[in-house]
Image (cartoon, rainbow, N blue to C red):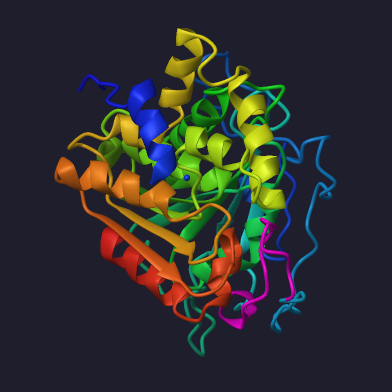
Amino acid sequence: MRKVVVCGATLAAACVSAVGVLPTGANADPADAEPVPGVSATTAPPPDLVPGESPATPAPPSEAPAPATPEPEPSARQAPDDDSVTSGSAVMVTPEPPAVRTYAYGSAARQRLDVYWRKPAKPPVDPQGRTAAAPKPAPGPAVLMLHGGYWLEGDKSGWKYFARRLTGQGFTVIAANYRLAPDAVWPAQRDDALTALGYVKKNAARWNIDPAKIVVMGSSAGGMLATQIGTAGEGADRVRGVVALSPVNNPYLAYRQGERPDATTGQRKLRGAVLDLIKCVPGSTDACWVRVEDASSATHATSGDAPMLLLHSVGDFVPVTHSTALASALRAVGVAANVQTVPGRAHGPSLMNDPQVYPRILKFLKDRTG
């Protein structure tokens, strides 16, 4: 279905008044170490699977096996502008760690993803030492996760605690990096997210994933990429749903909010990040407006889009108006969109410090993939 841009410069202004492989788990299977072909929308297949951290990020190339006991919790006293995963005990208490591997889905250094999955339990052995035959489990659901960081920074490893907990609920979790601004100009970030999703679907059998049961989830800038996946083309054909924490769904609104005298540090940084993302000043040229509008998820809303759960805190520096406008556009074309707020000033994954948030997310995931 052809997408029609519905938000012009006038509407945008009006919006302001109203957003290789290395085994890393102790139970990794050496038999899985053969290369998996990459998928790229614009380039030849990428090299064999490699240790997947970008030179721009300090994360180590492999992660030591996590202990079976609960992970230690970082400090909950975190600045509201911080976009890292924080402490809520509902998130950080994890079961036995899953298998974790890093794969290349493209040739660029940032085009890497981590897959967290749990292998089926070994069948019982009878007193004669014979192993009982066990049927292969049916393919299961998956969640593709996209990190935040103003489109300028951040890393897939920030999702590891949440990913481990979700695998305990029967999900395979894929945490993806993507190319960052200012080196990569919009829509490179959306292209990478879509390519990562395509890679997972093409190789779904490797992790026993049902490619028709994938939900995308993101935080802040990654939340915006998640809503873009859900609204790009026929979003519901790609993913079963979208969960977004503090998504920057309207970069133009963020640009204008960041120039106010009372803007927070996070809002001022986000304003500069918008300029780095689109590589132009909104309103300077018609071509710049086209790029700004393309980066606004509401302009892509059609009846074929994926249902969404959009969450903010009351004092979020990315205010809930970023999601209410998107939800209104989706509902107008018959797509379910649920916007929820929680008390406080939490942003992104910090929202999961609220004890009600994780259960809401888990229910949405299970409802959409059940």
Magenta segment includes 92: yes
- In this rendering, the answer to whether 319 lies above or below 58 is below
Residue under the point 44% across and 39% down: 16
The residue most toward the front is 261
Q: Is residue 345 left or right of residue 182?
A: left
Can see residue 12? yes
Name the chief secondary structure element in magenta. Answer: loop
Residue under the point 34% across and 71% down: 363
- In this rendering, the answer to whether 228 lies above or below 148 is above
Q: Position of residue 97 (x, y in %)?
A: 64, 70
Q: Is residue 246 left or right of residue 60?
A: left
Q: Quadrant of residue 311?
A: bottom left
Q: Position of residue 252 (x, y in %)?
A: 50, 32
Q: Position of residue 370 (x, y in %)?
A: 26, 64
Q: Position of residue 51 (x, y in %)?
A: 76, 40
**How many discs appear?**
0
Residue under the point 64% across and 41% down: 270
Magenta segment includes 84: yes
Magenta segment: 77-93
- In this rendering, the answer to whether 254 lies above or below 357 is above
Q: Quadrant of residue 338?
A: bottom left
Q: Is residue 85 left or right of residue 318?
A: right
Image quadrant in which the N terminus is located: top left
Q: Is residue 20 left or right of residue 147?
A: right
Q: Quadrant of residue 2?
A: top left
Q: Nearer the viewer, residue 114 or 263?
A: 263
Can see residue 150? no
The residue most toward the bottom is 127
